[in-house]
Image (cartoon, coloured by chain):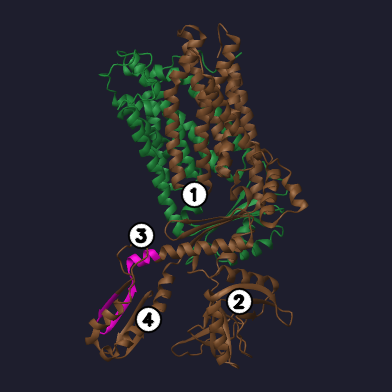
Chain colours: A green, B brown
Amino acid sequence: MRLRFFADETNYDFFRWRTATFGVSVFAVIASILLWVFVGLNFGIDFRGGTTIRTEAAEPVDVGAYRQAVETLNLGEVSVIEVFDPNFRDDQNVTMIRIQAQDGQESVTGDTIAQVQAALQQIAPSIEFASVESVGPKVSGELIMTAIIAVAAALVAILIYIWLRFEWQFSVGAVAALFHDTIVTIGIFSLLQIRFDLSTIAALLTIVGYSINDTVVIFDRLRENLRKYKTTPLQDVMNKSVNETLSRTVMTSGTTLVALIALLVFGGDVIRGFVFAITWGVVVGTYSSVYVAKNIVLMLGVTRDWSKPSDGGGGAGTQFANVDA
Amino acid sequence: MLQIPLWKRVVILGLCLLGILLALPNAFYTRVETHNDAVSAIETLGSTPEREADAGLWPSFLPATLVNLGLDLRGGAHLLAEVHVEDVYVDRMDTTWPDVRDALVAIRDQVGFVERLEAAAPGTLSLRIQNADAMPAALEAVRALAQPVVSLSGIGAQDLVVTGQGSTLTVELSPEEKLATDDRTVRQALEIIRRRIDEVGTREPTIQRQGEDRILIQVPGVGSAEELKGIIGTTARLTFHPVVSASATADTRTSAGQLLVQDIDEEAVWYVLESAAILSGEDLKTAQPGFDQNGQPSVTLSFNGHGAQVFGRFTSENVGALFATVLDDKVITAPQIREPITGGQAQITGNFTVESSTDLAVLLRAGALPAELTFLEERTISPGLGQDSIEAGRIAAVVGFVAVIVFMALSYGLFGIFANIALIVNLSMLLGVLSAFGATLTLPGIAGIVLTMGMAVDANVLVFERIREELKTAKGPSRAIELGYQRALSAIIDANITTFITSLILFLLGSGPVKGFAVTLMVGIVTSVFTAIWLTRLLVVIWFERRRPRTIEV
């Protein structure tokens, strides 16, 4: 008995709603950019400086009272969020308090932390600071630059690699898919106002890595089939390739999602944003490999004038040293 | 067709075994940790029955390196400090001034009187000479003081730049010398921070330079970043000055060459001191906490030869006068010299507690920081939160692991079991490699492991799906398996190389927990490709040789 999601041979037409799916992708990218520009990201202290304090207390949390207590200290903008997690014990009431960067200082001073703690102890005597993190404006500015460079460098590196291993059309298609994934993830972060910090950038790069993985597998099959079926129209070869790799795509995305959902549910709230980004990215990345990367390759067309003899059709695309570019 | 030579089999299984062996200590984390601590304690402090018993908890023939837990899992403090390298330029100019003055005094008949201008830009030395016409001679005399720069990049350059305009002569460090000085300053600061933290004796601190003028300090097990700052943040610049007046106030006016310094304990008490120090902390040989004759905590200082000599001469010549001990611009104590102190030892008594005298002794022993530090970033994570994170990560990993294994077994049957064995070996190897390299496991790193579990089976899925396809056309199962592995290879390689590229970028540009994530991801890619391509193939081949099935179902 085998668990099968599809019949051995599927023959779905992945290009039937080609305009619609591509339209959805384009719309999603534009909407995400608009959200990013007009709603904005909920930057964590990594990117805008300031201090976050994670408090734990036995007493139930009154967010308003917490905020008032901290606001009396005149530290500028203060936000208090209560954190919930199924892993917490009954007497574990957790909040995240964020305080803006103070004028004229880099990281927060011990005096300020002590003041905040004293003020909060008036409301919740058992309160303890599970973590205090503070980033000065100088570093946060640099971190933004590093993050942008990291994502850009990853995209360029992949563009070059795919170009070397496949053809430039594939390379453009793959990077467009990655761009789509990155932007749509940024979009969902600004829509849901999830905290966007350094670990989110790590998640973005992971998504890039995962999504390209998926795209490459389909491209690899496409390259092979293009040699096998020299006269079949491009669209049909593509459809065949997606169908042939469909089972694999679903299996791999399936196992990865299963592991990620375990992490999302049980992994604790500290990394939930990070895991959410990756989970979202796996879904979007799987979608974009089929509906973005391939659509673009289809639009750009592929040179099918194979001047090089393929090694008997069967072995095409299997040799590691088989560099096409 | 499906043949793997014996030597290859041995190598594959050997590597797997090695990985498992290296990972093994992590399964007994606390036990091995106790063992390691005991072993290092025996090495440095000698053997006791207790330590031997602790060391015996883990057999010495087994590997005992553990994967380091990052701050977010263990709890501790993280600081990113910026060294104010410019502070040193100021000091350098102050020490250059007497030489410049002497050089100009030697040609006084040409230049006339020389006066240092207090209004000079920070880090530069400006002076006015009486005779503006003699500027070329003055420039020449001062330039003769310049030394070649001692550094690789600054070869051939001089350390001082001397310019003259009208009657004003300006001396400053050359850009090459500034670079060389910056580098020295940061190294020196790094070394002193390391010494101070080592004095406190905590486990596995990370102290490393970042960029030009920054130092990253991570210390597990410290209660808070504030505490850590207390250990490293004080400049601990100790100087001794003759006291001009002990009854000053905050707005007492001082004349040139004098300093107004506040008392460390009483805000209202100020002293006027001569700004030239008799001695500084550099002449200190060692500092020990102790008690004075009244039983009050104190710090006993021993000077080196030069220090003892200077101190002896000064106290002999000034019996009855006051002298002040100044730490970081605050007067600790300003006692009267009752008798000459010639033994090279002195005792500082002040308003100390046992703890503060011990701290001060530690700071003085480690030496003064060459420049001030600003903290750009600080993070404190309590051990409790770290423990919660480990717990959550562990549950998530187990649940994810079981789910993936069940999923694979249901989908591919026996081949799924092979893939699962490979997955288990893969995880052990991952952990083993991380421990062997002394990598640090962070919370995102745990996420990386869980993600690896999901993605590691991908290579096998590719192969198995391919085998399924080949079964439809190829003759016989053995050929199908062969072709399946062969034809899936290019997809596996391309897919993993691209993922590796992004992880590498993450590793190069990331920091702290993110770096930890990138490391697990990179190692995970390598081990998963290894286990998926070689180990499962070996398992399939062994099974195939034994059973010789006519048909296979994947």
Task: Using the rendered image, report if marks 3 and 4 lie on a common chain.
Answer: yes
Which numbered disc, 1 or 4, marks the residue that appears first in the sequence? 4
The image's mark for residue B152 is 3
Q: Compared to B292, does A313 lie above or below?
A: above
Q: CA distance from mark 3 to mark 2?
A: 37 Å
Q: Is residue A61 visible?
A: no
State left or right for residue A278 relative to residue A161: right
At label 3, which amino acid type do we have? Leu
**Magenta segment boundaries in residue numbering:** B162-180
Q: Identify the residue at the far right of this view.
A: B49
Tell whether label 4 touches label 1 (CB within 8 Å).
Answer: no
Secondary-structure class at tag 2: strand
Q: What amino acid does circle 1 point to?
A: Ser
**Numbered tag placed on residue B302 in the rendering:** 2
Q: For residue A179, which quarter of the picture?
A: top left
Decide: few, some or many residues near mark 2? Use Cα within 10 Å; few <14, some 14-19, many ≥20.
some
Q: Chain of mark 4?
A: B
Q: Type of residue at label 2?
A: Ser
